[in-house]
Amino acid sequence: MITMTMTELDRLKVVQAVCERRLKPGQAADPLALSVRQVERLVLRYRSQGASGLLSRHRGHPSNYQLADGVAERALNLIRDCYADFGPTLACEKLRECHGLGLSKETVRHLMTEAGLWIPRRQRPPKIYQPRARRACLGELIQIDGSDHRWFEERSPACTLLVYIDDATSRLMALHFTATESTFSYFEATRGYLEQHGSKPRQRDNKDTNRDTSTLLPLRRFRMASTSTRKISNSTHYFRILPNSRTHRRSRSRFKFLQRYLTNSTGEST
């Protein structure tokens, strides 16, 4: 019994037609994507060995591109122990830099997929994103984003424009040009926004009593997406006016530096 693939079955039918003189070797070369000489070799092999002569001679033999013994197992052990939360590309780089394993990223991806350490994106369940409704009031939520562009053409170097957009009305609340999109640039732009628009939200304290605040926006009710001093990537950031909550009290310590910055800047301007 001979097992053949569909490609080999199609090749068998064409070679049989050549042997029965229903096709010429030149006519059979086009559908098989082979040269006339290769077709003649297949005909000779078919006449001498039969249908088994058309089978691939690589069948049953190890691949010429297989990994050496123990390399795949060593790579998987290292990935499980040190890089279990890494993607295939980063894991491939670390294996090459730190352990001297020169594997391609697709080989690492294949090994991690078979071992259950990585799920291809096509096999992941789709993410369902619920649309967010706009805020009800002006100033309740401000979206911040930076755009790097040659705003002044050739008259000035390229710079970044920081844009403050109100979520409820889509109104431009503040525009600020800066050299780079950094944390201190956002601090400076936020100070200008607060000096221009101010903030008088109603705040609920722990005793459930309402009181007005006429000062600038307190830091415990101020939230930004990034507080590091390194450059911020091109993504949208938010800050909003919210009542005190456990989440805000827990994250208050992360904004002490921003509080000192805004307090000192306000004191200097006054």
Image (cartoon, rainbow, N blue to C red):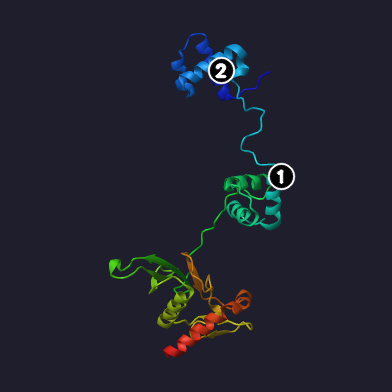
Where residue 40 appears, x then y in whole percent? 50, 16
Q: Quadrant of residue 4?
A: top right
Q: Quadrant of residue 45?
A: top right
Q: Nearer the viewer, residue 100 or 148?
A: 100
Amino acid type shown at disc 2: Leu
Quarter placement of the C terminus = bottom left
- For disc 1, the marked residue is 70
Q: Is residue 177 left or right of residue 53?
A: left
Where residue 56 appears, x then y in whole percent? 60, 25
Q: Report crowding for label 2: few under 14, some 14 to 19, many 20 or more residues within 10 A (C-alpha).
A: many
Where residue 128 appears, x then y in whole percent? 56, 54
Q: Nearer the viewer, residue 51 or 116?
A: 51
Amino acid type shown at disc 1: Gly
- For disc 2, the marked residue is 12
| Nearer mark to the viewer, of 2 and 1 | 1
Q: Nearer the viewer, residue 66 or 189?
A: 66
Where residue 244 appears, x then y in whole percent? 59, 78
Q: Secondary structure at mark 2?
A: helix
Q: Identify whether 122 is placed above or below 177.
A: above
Q: Nearer the viewer, residue 100 or 200?
A: 100
Q: Secondary structure at mark 1?
A: loop
The numbered mark, 2 or 1, whose residue comes first in the sequence reads 2
- Per the model, the C-alpha gap separating discs 2 and 1 is 40 Å
